[in-house]
Image (tube, helix red, strand yellow):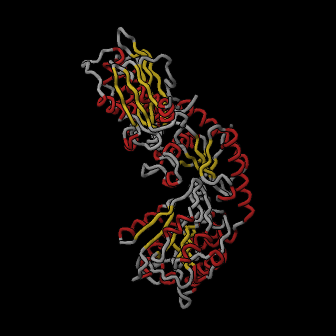
Amino acid sequence: MSLPYSEKVIEYFKNPKNVGEIENADAVATEGSPACGDMVKLFLKVDPDTRVIEDIKFKSYGCASNIATASIITELAKKKSIEEAKKINWKQASDALGGLPPVKVHCAVLAVDALKTAIENYEHKRGIVTKKEPTTVKMIRKRLARVINPLTGLDVLKVNFVKEISLNDGKVDILVDLNSDHQFAGNIKEEIKERIEPLWDIDRVEVLFLDQAVKAEKP
Amino acid sequence: MGNRNVYLDNNAATRVDERVVRYMDRFHESDFAVASSQFSHTPGIKAKDAVEQSRETVAKSLGAGTDEIVFTSGGTESNNLALLGIARGAGETKRNRIVISAIEHFSVLHSADRLAREGYEVKKSPVDGEGFVDTEALSRLVNDRTLLVSVMHANHEVGTLQDLAAISAIAHRNGAYFHTDASYSFLQIPIDVKKTGIDLLTADANMVHGPKGTGALYIRKNVPLSKIFEGGYQEYNIRPGTENVPGIAGFGKAVEIWDAEDVRRTALLRDDLKDRLVRGIEGTLINGPQDMKKRIPNNINVSFNYIEGESVVLHLDMRGIAVITGSACFSRALQASHVLLAMGFTHERAHGSIRFSPSKYTVPEDIVYTYENVQDVVARLRELSPVGKK
């Protein structure tokens, strides 16, 4: 049988390593969306003194190469310092898997992005970012541009899905064009919080849904 | 669970019946001459007789006249011939509108695109959440400048069966011709082209346990259809090229031996699989008609929440089960199924869709084996998935 995938990809697809979530993770990052057909979520546990990634776990929605690359990324990053882990690129992930079909390279890119974002989130959270720029609404929008609305496959800033962003003294309120009982409401809320909360000068992020906002307005 | 090979992709290709294969052999090995006119040599006449016998069988199965059946290389060519052929054959006419549905097979969609590039006005009728053409919307799109309405009888992904008589009435009320791509319903659901009011109908041999590369187009008498490529005078001067005698003979044989009892049995297996999936796997959503009688007997399409289809397909393949998905990852074009999107589903639902299509060769043990493996694979992938409630 000639599958388009290497034996290694198939092996990781069948028996992925480091699957799951880390409770009280030091950093979390999600890239992609079910709407695009690919999504990876990474959880990091980092030693605060050595800055070594002590534990890393993943969850994945997607095809075989998505699952395999996310799994291999966790293996490549485990026990590495965050500085070393930052340098892992998609080519290394692909090589470690014995190569990926060209149309599936984006899966490796996605997993690498998730690792980079998770490390970035960790640095913000620990206040070890090199340049401590104060967060602006513009910066928040830039981060939100990577949250995909699973209903449309577009980022949440497109078609005014994010209706309002307010930033006040480390507190962020984001109003989205969705009711709180929607199938994806929980996921979107979680992802938005995950993108904004780690910023070094942000204390609290609230995601408000249409129905809640309307209720709040009523006396 | 043991190990089996279970082929559930019969809406894509079917196993050719042994009797068909044996019958076709003759036209490869001994009666291999070009089908020729009655004034030719004996081998040529023998081949011609086989072709004509098939034509009669296929015509009879549709309630058509023998001179209304043209053999082609399959469903795709028949659909091209129907759309492009009527546009070429209509000549100068004020009718420059083509109306199709949004869920047609690529061979109709892309033929319509070609006509749009050539100056035709192409309108696509929407479908509802079960894949049924909205006949009210359709009747608003069809006007007295419409040349052709083309709506498939059964959809290849979700199996939805359209009300052909109603759609034909809309077309004819406006003086337009009516074509239906019946590739996926031919013989599964009996069709009488005269009673239903069909002007052009596509059938494909490989959907009915006949050979690949063989199909037919029913062309009602007096429909002005022109050939779309040039060559000799074969097939009533509508489809040039040496006839595919083994294929055509095999097509006729497949139709001749078709047994309605197999259809009934296949539908029961399909119903059984559907019931098991819906009852046994939480978050299984049926794509297409909920009422199984409103879809072809050999199709069920479902989406499993929170997981992606290519992974399901690959896991099942490694366990010997052949199915397909409407996920973008799976498609050559890397695009999610246009059928499911036209039905109003999210990309996520399309990415998670799996089509199961049994045939007369499917046995009850296959269904049990498939269900047990699907249940296991879905559970594993959900465990891995970052989406959804745990």
Q: Is residue A37 left or right of residue B3?
A: left
In percent of width and height, residue B127 lies at: 54, 58
Q: Is residue B211 visible?
A: no
Of B67 and B214, the residue lying toward us = B67
Please report the residue visible at 44 percent of the width from the left and 72 percent of the height from the top: B97
Q: Is residue B149 visible?
A: yes
When the figure is inspected, residue B81 is found, relative to residue B236, above or below; the finding is: above
When the figure is inspected, residue B214 is found, relative to residue B95, above or below; the finding is: above
Question: Toward which corner of the image does residue A41 lie, by quadrant?
Answer: top left
Of A198 and B43, the residue lying toward us = A198
Question: Toward which corner of the image does residue B87 lie, by quadrant?
Answer: bottom left
When the figure is inspected, residue B374 is found, relative to residue A200, above or below; the finding is: below
The residue positioned farthest toward the bottom in the image shown = B39
The residue positioned farthest toward the top in the image shown = A49
In percent of width and height, residue A51 lies at: 35, 13
Of A27 and A184, the residue lying toward us = A184
Please report the residue visible at 40 percent of the width from the left and 36 percent of the height from the top: A162
Picture mark count = 0
Please report the residue visible at 44 percent of the width from the left and 44 percent of the height from the top: A152
In percent of width and height, residue B34 lies at: 52, 79
Please report the residue visible at 62 percent of the width from the left and 62 percent of the height from the top: B161
Q: Is residue A98 left or right of residue B34?
A: left
